[in-house]
Image: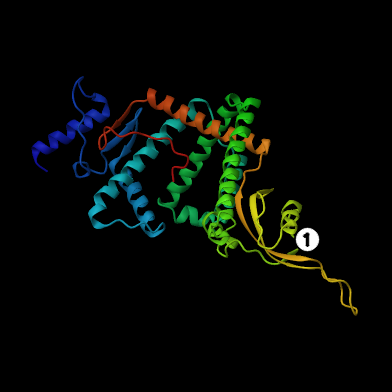
Amino acid sequence: MSMCRLICLLGVLLVLAGAGCKKGEEKKALAPGDLPPSAVVVSVDGAILTFGEMERRASGLHTNAIQREGIYYPPSMAQEAMAAFRKKAINDFVYKTLMLKEAARLGIAVNEQKQAAGLQRLVRALAQNNSTTNDYFSKGPYPPDVMRSDFHDNLVIDELFSQRAQRNIKVMDEDVERGVAAVEATNAVRRATLEAARKQILEGAPFEDVARTISEDTPTARQGGELREFARGRYEAAFEDAAFSLSVGQVSDVVETRHGYHIIKLLARNPAQAVADGIPPVPETVRAAHILLKAQPIDRSTIAAAVYREKFAEARLALYEELKAKAKIENALFPDMEYKAVTNTR
């Protein structure tokens, strides 16, 4: 390394150590090759991330993306991709540092019971993808010790937000009513969409083509909406009443069930057969096709939970923005980088 370059490097490190830039001086980003592993690349109120640790995390994220997530980066984008992973490693460090500092200030910690509960939540989440905690900790983007440390830190951060939420977040009746109104408006749009589709069918559009295009009953949509032959007792009463009241070839009005909104076309009718020569009676059956647009049920408890989650997310972001505004953050590689809140630093 030339004497000139060494002097420049020492100057940058002094800035990060606290000397600061003179007023009016322009920040200058470094290239990764300018720093040794021990150099400080990011400082958050005195907490530091070294170049070596940043590279270890960024490389782990990069390897994980390629080997486990199947993401491919053409050689021409290698430097751009690595820069993105470096930024993610830095962003995660800044976020976690600010959150853990606030948790420490408030005396928030996670006891063994809450750690066990957090681990059980992780087990249930991983089971949905046929994965295990061993996979999570041993095959993640970071070494197992770092994965376990990050997992514990995330529990502390979650506890920080939970305690703040319990004190500050209130779901009011008017919040729920606004949610109900939003659901009703969405459902009205979906019903109107199906009304318009029915009008097209009555004007000559093939029922089968419309079903394949818009029906949200995926298995039957591929068959032009056609259902298996059925007798009464298979579907909801409203659906069956409409189907059995139609003439062959006729299309129903819009029918509402717990699944959403349907239009039904009767394809065939098979009359009931009475007992004859010891053969049991056969009930009336029909063959029909339908088009379904799903509706969101109006459940006030579910809507209240959704409102709570939305307010929780807003509060989480507001706290992070508040802490970030008060913090002293210095970034040698990406001086103008924007730091965003994250829900999982993995």
Relative image position of residue 242 (x, y in whole percent): 72, 54
Closer to us: 303 or 342: 303
Q: Look at 22% across and 54% down and name the residue there.
A: 76
Is residue 164 toward the left or the right of residue 26 in the image?
right
Colour scheme of the rendered structure? rainbow
Closer to us: 29 or 286: 286
Viewport quadrant of the N terminus:
top left
Relative image position of residue 129 (x, y in whole percent): 54, 57
The answer to which quarter of the image holds residue 53 is top left
Q: Look at 49% across and 57% down and name the residue there.
A: 135
Is 285 above or below relative to 303? Answer: below
Closer to us: 234 or 344: 234
Q: Look at 51% across and 42% down and name the residue there.
A: 152
Q: Which residue is mark 1?
A: 232
Relative image position of residue 109 (x, y in whole percent): 54, 33
Closer to us: 195 or 157: 195
What's the amino acid at mark 1? Arg
Q: Is residue 298 visible?
A: yes
Relative image position of residue 263 (x, y in whole percent): 64, 53
The answer to which quarter of the image holds residue 27 is top left
Q: Look at 56% across and 46% down and name the residue there.
A: 193
Q: How many marks?
A: 1
Q: Secondary structure at mark 1?
A: loop
